[in-house]
Image (spheres, coloured by chain):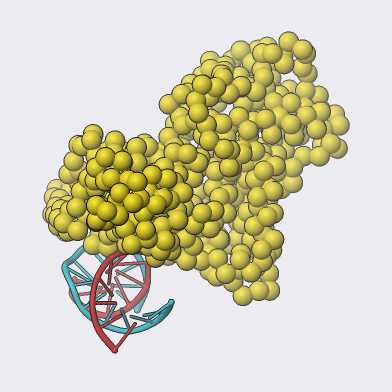
Chain colours: A yellow, B red, C cyan
Amino acid sequence: MAHVCIHWFRKGLRLHDNPALIAALKDCKELYPVFILEPYLHNTQVGINRRRFLIGALKDLDCSLRKLNSRLFVLRGKPEDVFPKLFKEWNVTKLTYEYDTEPYSLNRDEKVTSLARKHAVEVIYKISHTLYNIERIMEENGGKPPLTYKRLQAIVQKLGPPKKPISAPHLENMKDVKTPCSKKFEEKYGIPTPEELGLESTSLGEELFPGGEQEALRRLDEHVKKTAWVCCFEKPQTSPNSLSPSTTVLSPYITFGCLSARTFWWRITEVYQGRKHSNPPVSLHGQLLWREFFYTGSVGINDFNKMEGNPVCIQVDWDTNPEYLAAWREARTGFPFIDAIMTQLRQEGWIHHLARHAVACFLTRGDLWISWEEGQKIFEDLLLDGDWALNAGNWQWLSASAFFHQFFRVYSPIAFGKKTDKNGDYIKKYLPVLKKFPPKYIYEPWKAPRSVQHAAGCIVGKDYPHPIVQHEQVSKKNIQRMKEAYAKRSSNSNESPIKEQGVKRKALSVYEMPQKKIRKE
DNA sequence: CGCAGAGTTGAGTCG
DNA sequence: TCGACTCAACTCTGC
């Protein structure tokens, strides 16, 4: 029996390594490639750079589908409202999509699946967003997510390398498949315009990282060609403040699924073949395993994007301080390194991983003592590669709330950037108001004598803000506050309900708490 | 159970 | 310029 099939693109905006799309083409007479602009995911709350990236990715996808005599149908609305109409109108018999582990997506997909069942539509989903089936990683670890990278490494060692990516469909795959569409469809299901996504009136910077699978594969090729660079890659050795990115900037493409993580993995493997190379956690493979690490945490740990209710997260008495938060968000903390990073983030939608460390530490445990959840929201808005699991996981890491516990290691908003950019060229690029400051004062302009400030044409307190905190003092105080938060956790876990239930354990270790949650479900 | 060692990416000082 | 050491001190793992 030939099917009428919808392949639903959500993430996974690509044709290569798309097993759900291939499944759609099996015994298929009519294929409808669909993307739904969801009010929750694609409204104006999401940053302008992300929306522009999405348009690029959809255009590219449509273009590739047209080469296969198909096209992309973009619909508007809630999936649970949209699908029943489509099922009826198109006489759909099969729905395929890529599995997505985010709580919002799981909930949505469950609703859509039950609607499909009511319409006698067969549903097929495939895992291709992550290297592995995340559930398998947890199974291999006794049903709980690994809390250390080492453990994850041991697990994936047992699982073997990730699956090899599969090819994009060719014209031969499409020879019995039609995508019915009339002129009317063109108007109804077109790619969103910048105006539709509210970008027309906004001042957008240069598009440094255009969305789309073709651009992703081009970018991948470009980096994979540099054999020595790939083999020597060590993340901590790359610079957070180089004038052009010191890493691949493939992350936005992986987030949107323009690039398959498994394709990236195996292309790196090809380069490594027979050569000496770096290893996880610092290598390029290692970076993809970090992604897997946080994905596993996000699946196995309840309330992963929150402090309260999150069993692995240290409970901290963060301050509510809208002024500080706004200063951080709007790049006016008075610390040029921090403000330059936040400017790059807002303008370009991407900052280096270590730059994220610097600003995240500054917002939370280092200086401003503001909850990592606030930072998480702002990153989600501004980062092209804002990924639910990675954003939550990394914010917990940086704020020493989970996974990382050496809270006494604090980044200096002055010293850290100097290591890789003594002259402050990065600061000058993103904060032109400071461009005439001599290197001696570029990281701490408030220390420059009045004459130097005059010569630079920038008076601190007038043209550029005074630092909002005194880092030396406030960071010391904050280390003590972290110490108290950690001490409180140890005593709290001694009072855990497990003990009351008569289990002979003095404490429920953090490691065991997620397991308990999972079993309850 | 207790303890040693490790932990992608700290800063500052000294030689 | 770079490595070793100190600062003060966390959790998780593995033995």
Up/down of A407 relative to A33, above or below: below
Up/down of A51 relative to A444, above or below: above
Q: Position of residue A303 (x, y in %)?
A: 33, 39
Judge by depth and name the residue closer to the eye, A214 or A262.
Answer: A214
In the figure, is residue A94 to the left or right of A482? right
Q: Position of residue A274 (x, y in %)?
A: 68, 74
Q: Residue at x 43, y 26 (%)?
A: A45
Which quadrant is the N terminus of chain A positioned in?
top right
Q: Residue at x 43, y 63 (%)?
A: A420
Q: Residue at x 49, y 62 (%)?
A: A238
Which quadrant is the C terminus of chain A positioned in?
top left
Judge by depth and name the residue closer to the eye, A16 or A105.
Answer: A16
Q: Is residue A39 visible?
A: yes
Q: Position of residue A404 (x, y in %)?
A: 32, 58
Q: Residue at x 81, y 28 (%)?
A: A69
Q: Position of residue A124 (x, y in %)?
A: 63, 33
Q: Is residue A499 visible?
A: no
Judge by depth and name the residue closer to the eye, A7 or A265.
Answer: A265
Count of numbered labels shown in the rendering: 0
In the figure, is residue A452 to the left or right of A119? left
Up/down of A243 relative to A349, above or below: below
Up/down of A114 relative to A13, above or below: above
